Image (tube, rainbow, N blue to C red):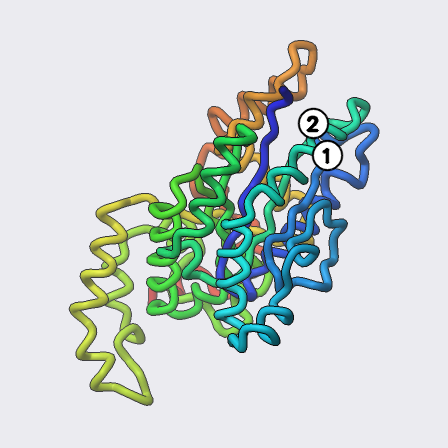
Amino acid sequence: MTVVFGQIVVGPPGSGKTTYCAAIQDYFNKFITDHSSRHVYIVNLDAANVDMPYECAIDLVDLITVDDVCDNLNLGPNGSLMYCIEYIENNIDWLLKRLKILIDKHSLTLPPPYILFDCPGQTELYTHHGSIHHIIEKLLKNLDLRLCCVNLIDSYYCSNSSNFISALLTSLSMMLHLELPHVNILSKIDLIEIYGSLEYNIDFYTEVLDLSFLMKNKNFNKDKFQPKLAKKYKKFNKLLCDIIQDYSLVSYISLNVQDRLSIEKVNNTIDKANGFIFGHLKNDDLSQRTNLMSNAYGVEQFEYAKTAKIRENYTFADDEELED
């Protein structure tokens, strides 16, 4: 049986999950005959996603839609989306059957099949609700997929310290709840300073450095609408930072979907996480051997080099200004 690799693409609403899936599909399928190492199929698990910018192989909308649930069960948009995910969990055979047909019909003349699961934007599905976790378990058990969870977080959350702590907690909860190899991504990195300059260097956010600096930041505990409330939760915020650092699991890589080099960097990280780089190594392919060693040892030897392009292209404050 063919070993099939893939990604579970998750994240809050508006983080760019669908755009990311379209970019990955375009990246690998556009030059499929000569250059691509895989053929990408996308499975849409968002029952509210009816206008997709990519070619969809399997669509949950064919089984159930949010509009139908709203009309027939009198639920709101969020409740309807939750119902749809629980519905596909209870009817998982519908999805398994179509995935088996997709894999079996995959042409041997094409590169290996690679499946992206475009998931809804309800954060609670990945932090504490059980349906997505159960769906993943059944996919792994019945189809023996090699999956990696790709969590997209809008880089906007770096513009404010309290928002960044919220993003860190969300990412940590997802990692613990979904129990998959996990890659966290700061999406829309080209817009990272659209709401103002960052309080620290970009590597502070990607590597999740000493969070005590957030607590010392003069703007962290200021709230012009509720100043007493901000002061009241200072100790609480400190404890949240301590929890995040005690686990020491969360870090981010940056992504600009309009930059093919950025997509390649992200993809190399994911390939190492889900094992694709090891599972499809050809004995006579020197380029893949080189890519394997690059993933194992890391091409970028210095932390500064990892974020140099972001600082040059997308941020405007130099180090001295940030230290002040």
Q: Residue furthest top?
A: 283
Return the disc, 1 or 2, that comes first in the chain's sequence.
1
The image shows residue 320 at horizontal and vertical percentages of 39, 62
Quadrant into which the N terminus falls: top right
Nearest the camera: 156 or 128?
128
Q: Which residue is mark 1?
A: 39
Which of the numbered marks, if any, corresponds to residue 191? none
> How many labels, in total?
2
Residue 272: image x %, image y %?
51, 30
The image quadrant of residue 6 is: top right
Secondary structure category for the residue under label 1: strand
Please tell me which residue is depicted at 82% across the width and 28% down the height of the picture. Answer: 34
Discs 1, 2 touching: Cβ within 8 Å? yes
User: Is residue 311 among what the camera can see?
Assistant: no
Callout 2: SS: loop
Position of 213 compared to 100: left or right? left
Nearer to us in this view, 311 or 138: 138
Q: Residues within 10 Å of mark 2 (few under 14, many from 20)?
A: many
Quarter of the image for residue 99 reads top right
Q: Position of residue 256 (x, y in %)?
A: 61, 54
> Where does the C terminus fall, quadrant-wise?
bottom left
**Which residue type does callout 1 highlight?**
His
Q: Residue furthest bottom?
A: 225
Q: Is residue 142 above or below residue 166?
A: above
Left of 202 or right of it: where is 113?
A: right
Determine whether 153 is above or below 287 in the image: below
- Distance between the alpha carbons at the discs numbered 1 and 2: 6 Å
Asked if residue 184 shows in the view, the reply is yes
User: Residue 168: x and y, percent?
Assistant: 36, 57
Residue depicted at 48% across the width and 65% down the height = 317
Residue beneath disc 2: 112
Identified by mark 2, the residue type is Pro
